[in-house]
Amino acid sequence: MTLQADLAAERTIAAERAGRKIVVEIKSFIGQSHTQDFKLALGQYNLYLGLLELTAPDRKLYLAISHKIYDKYFRQKAVQMIAERFQLAMIIVNLETEEIVQWIR
């Protein structure tokens, strides 16, 4: 099975953090509904997680999102509960400064 990015602004990249290999799924959340965007992102995240377990079990998967989306949407209690339930590992990025502001899990 081959997976490819669905949008130019959203992609999957391989990288390294503290000597550990990681895969980062970048999501923009620019659709009309953040809930719909989250549903799609969570589905892709779980699909990639399953495939990584089979093909690259040494890699850790992260979902990268902007700090504005995190503050606006991901801090809602229901969204936090879902993210915890699925053990969603995230990288929160300040797009203006192009800096990682938080690693979650």
Image: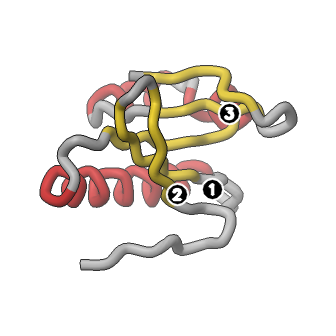
Q: Disc 2 and disc 3: Cα gap in Å? A: 21 Å
Label ID, residue 18? none
- What amino acid does circle 2 point to? Gln
User: Furthest residue to the bottom?
Assistant: 1
Residue 82 seen in render: no
Is 64 situated left or right of 66 in this image?
Answer: left
**Residue under the image location 29 percent in, 43 percent down:** 59
Quarter assignment of residue 94: top right
Between the C-alphas of marks 1 and 3, the distance is: 20 Å
Q: Quadrant of the C terminus?
A: top left
Q: Which residue is mark 1?
A: 33
How far across and how far down the image is residue 24, in percent?
47, 47
CA neighbours of label 1 inside 10 A, class few (<14), some (14 to 19), many (20+): few
- Mark 2 crowd level (few <14, some 14–19, many ≥20, 10 Å Cα): few
Badge 1 marks a residue whose secondary structure is: loop
The residue tagged 2 is 36
Q: Which mark is residue 93?
A: 3
Q: Are marks 1 and 3 in contact (CB under 8 Å)?
A: no
- The structure residue drawn at horizontal position 43% and vertical position 23%, both measured from the top left corner, is 18
Tell me the residue at 18%/46% (across/down): 57
The first of marks 2 and 3 along the sequence is 2
User: Front-most of 38 and 91?
Assistant: 91
- Disc 2 vs disc 3: Cβ atoms closer than 8 Å? no
User: Residue extending furthest right?
Assistant: 96
Q: Can residue 75 be seen from the camera position used here?
A: yes
Please tell me which residue lies in front, 54 or 104: 54
Does the residue at mark 2 contact the one at mark 1 (Cβ under 8 Å)?
Answer: yes
